[in-house]
C-alpha cells in the first residue's frame, strides 16, 4: 500500500476510475449481448430497435476514454453487419 499522501490520493482516484470504467464496460457488454441474443432468436424488430441504443452507449464509452475509438468503431460495425444480415 502507498505511504505518501499524494500516493494515497492517487490510489483512491484510481479505484474510483476503475469502478466507473467497470460500470461503463458492463453496460456495453450487456447491450451487445441483448442484440446478439435477439439476432440468434430471429427477433429482427427487437434487434433493429436496440442497435441505435447500442451505438449511442458504445460511442459514449469511447468518448469517455473507456474504450479506444477503433474498438468502439469495430464493435458498432460488427453489430450493424449482424443486424443488417437478419432482414
Image: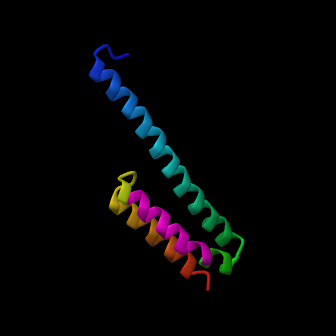
Q: Position of residue 80 (x, y in %)?
A: 50, 75
- x 61%, y 81%: residue: 86
Decide: is 25 above or below 4: below
Q: Is residue 77 magenta?
A: no
Q: Is residue 23 above or below residue 12?
A: below
Task: Using the rendered view, name the quadrant where residue 16 is placed.
Answer: top left
Q: Is residue 36 above or below residue 42?
A: above
Q: Quadrant of residue 85?
A: bottom right
Q: Position of residue 10 (x, y in %)?
A: 32, 28
Q: Nearer the viewer, residue 24 or 75?
A: 24
Expressed as whole percent of the image width and height from the top left, the position of residue 76 reads: 45, 69
- 56 magenta-colored: yes
- Name the residue nearer the viewer: 7 or 86: 7
The residue lying toward the viewer, choosing from 36 and 10, is 10
Residue numbers of the magenta segment = 49-62
- Which residue is pictured at 55% across the width and 54% down the height? 27
- Quadrant, the C terminus: bottom right
Up the image or down, 6 lies above or below 35; here it is above
Question: x and y percent of residue 77 in the render?
Answer: 44, 72
Name the side, left or right, on which 66 lies relative to 25. Answer: left
Residue 40, image quadrant: bottom right
Amino acid at each position: 500500500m502507498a505511504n505518501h499522501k499524494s500516493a494515497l490520493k492517487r490510489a483512491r482516484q484510481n479505484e474510483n476510475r476503475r469502478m466507473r470504467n467497470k460500470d461503463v464496460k458492463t453496460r456495453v457488454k450487456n447491450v451487445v449481448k441483448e442484440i446478439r441474443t435477439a439476432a440468434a432468436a430471429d427477433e429482427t424488430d427487437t434487434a433493429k430497435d436496440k442497435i441505435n441504443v447500442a451505438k449511442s452507449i458504445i460511442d459514449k464509452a469511447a468518448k469517455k476514454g473507456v474504450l479506444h475509438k477503433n474498438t468502439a468503431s469495430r464493435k458498432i460495425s460488427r453489430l450493424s453487419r449482424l443486424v443488417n444480415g437478419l432482414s
